[in-house]
Image (cartoon, helix red, strand yellow):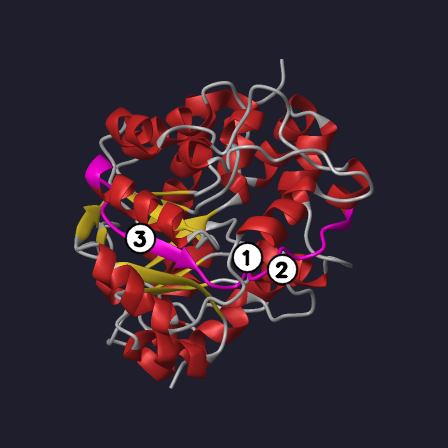
């Protein structure tokens, strides 16, 4: 009998065995030489934790808030696309598992499942990740739809005026198989991601449909459409973080799109301290990219993030075991975070402070 996974990494092999090769390459790949993909992981490993001793950690509280929503641990589901390619229940399984974990989910614009169904399936708060289409009418209709569905925030992705060149997708001519769609854009006529000869169908979809003219003034435009807080995702520079703050963003996701956009861009934990120094306290900071261990969560919070977002590990859990697999990924990280906090002398999230990574 195969032993159950004892860490998040062990889900990767299980998922790879369960998912078809084109889908696996789509989930796993980064841009070009995949240097940033690897840097996202190695950068976490280079941060040392300077733990405290002789602190009463007999009781520990992992709970926190993200944009005012109380969650049981500072680990949330990042927006990742096409969950039904990993498991038939798709985003519904993910949403239910996030609810089981008493956490928070960000639903991708490229979901295979209608936003209304996802929100109805879970007890967790659901934020909606938004791509801005050239068709601003379709974008406006989508914003109003997700607000009516009960989503709690808009997370607008700003680092993808075009899709990064993912060579595995080019070789595989990545596309959505028959029966799969970008479900929330079907009504606008933008549900299909077709096969393209010698190219990634998703890259062609982005080039044809998404708006490369997106600029900071569009944050105000989005705010004019909705009462939802607007979060800006895809920031790696301190000056852009200040621009996001000044444009009225309620939060920033420090993200390089999982190493899938501009290769040789820095790892996200490399830049988090500078961004926190630039806007710390003014806007809420989240971070994704390479989070695999409970100690990574401690490092992110110590450098100024409110929570981390899990991308690929969610897909690994989904592919390996559906709802139960995703729930187990959360359980493993919860257990690791709880132990790391105890060993760092942190009885609560509030005690995870910068001196753990930058001792005075």
Q: Residue 133: x, y in percent?
A: 46, 52
Report crowding for label 3: few under 14, some 14 to 19, many 20 or more residues within 10 A (C-alpha): many
Q: Residue 169's quadrant in the figure?
A: top right
Q: Secondary structure at mark 2?
A: loop
Q: Nearer the viewer, residue 304 or 255?
A: 255
Which residue shows up at 43% across the image and 78% down it? 240
Q: If you read the primary sequence from the N terminus, does the residue marked by circle 3 or circle 1 appear first?
A: 3
Q: Is residue 352 visible?
A: no
Q: Is residue 282 visible?
A: yes
- Find disc 2 in the rendering and name its residue: 261
Q: Is residue 229 above or below residue 80?
A: below
Q: Residue 22: x, y in percent?
A: 72, 32
What is the spatial separation of the Cα atoms under label 3 and label 1, in whole angstroms?
Answer: 17 Å
Q: Is residue 29 above or below residue 11?
A: below
Which range of residues does the magenta coloring cover?
Answer: 148-167
What is the spatial separation of the Cα atoms under label 2 and label 3, in whole angstroms?
Answer: 21 Å
Q: Residue 77: x, y in percent?
A: 40, 43
Which residue shows up at 58% across the image and 67% down it? 267
- Find disc 3 in the rendering and name its residue: 154
Most frequent secondary structure within the magenta stretch: loop
Which residue shows up at 71% across the image and 34% down it? 195
Q: Give yes or no for contact between labels 1 and 2 (Cβ–Cβ under 8 Å).
A: yes
Q: Secondary structure at mark 3?
A: strand
């Amino acid at each position: 009998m195969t032993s159950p996974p004892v860490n998040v990494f062990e889900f990767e092999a299980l998922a790879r065995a369960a998912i078809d090769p084109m889908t696996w390459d789509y989930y796993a790949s980064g841009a070009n030489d995949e240097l940033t993909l690897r840097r996202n992981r190695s950068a976490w490993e280079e941060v040392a934790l300077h733990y405290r001793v002789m602190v009463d950690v007999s009781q520990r509280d992992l709970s926190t808030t993200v944009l005012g929503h109380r969650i049981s641990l500072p680990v949330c589901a990042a927006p990742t696309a096409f969950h039904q390619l990993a498991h038939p229940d798709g985003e519904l399984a993910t949403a239910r598992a996030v609810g089981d974990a008493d956490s928070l989910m960000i639903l991708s614009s490229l979901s295979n499942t209608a936003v209304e169904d996802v929100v109805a399936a879970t007890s967790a708060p659901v934020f909606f990740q938004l791509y801005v289409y050239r068709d601003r009418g379709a974008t406006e209709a989508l914003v109003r739809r997700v607000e009516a569905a009960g989503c709690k925030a808009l997370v607008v992705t700003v680092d993808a005026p075009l899709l990064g060149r993912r060579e595995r997708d080019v070789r595989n001519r990545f596309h959505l198989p028959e029966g799969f769609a970008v479900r929330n854009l079907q009504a606008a006529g933008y549900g299909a991601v077709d096969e393209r000869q010698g190219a990634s169908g998703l890259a062609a979809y982005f080039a044809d449909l998404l708006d490369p003219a997106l600029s900071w003034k569009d944050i105000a435009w989005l705010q004019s459409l909705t009462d939802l807080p607007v979060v800006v995702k895809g920031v790696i520079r301190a000056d852009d973080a200040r621009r996001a703050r000044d444009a009225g963003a309620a939060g920033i996701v420090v993200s390089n799109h999982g190493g899938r956009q501009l290769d040789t861009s820095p790892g996200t934990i490399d830049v988090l301290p500078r961004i926190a120094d630039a806007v710390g306290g003014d806007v809420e900071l989240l971070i994704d990219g390479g989070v695999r261990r409970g100690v990574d969560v401690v490092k992110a919070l110590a450098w100024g993030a409110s929570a981390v977002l899990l991308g690929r590990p969610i897909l690994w859990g989904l592919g390996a075991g559906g709802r139960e697999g995703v729930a187990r990924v959360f359980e493993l990280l919860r257990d690791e975070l709880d132990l790391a906090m105890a060993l760092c002398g942190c009885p609560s999230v509030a005690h995870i402070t910068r001196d753990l990574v930058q001792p005075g």
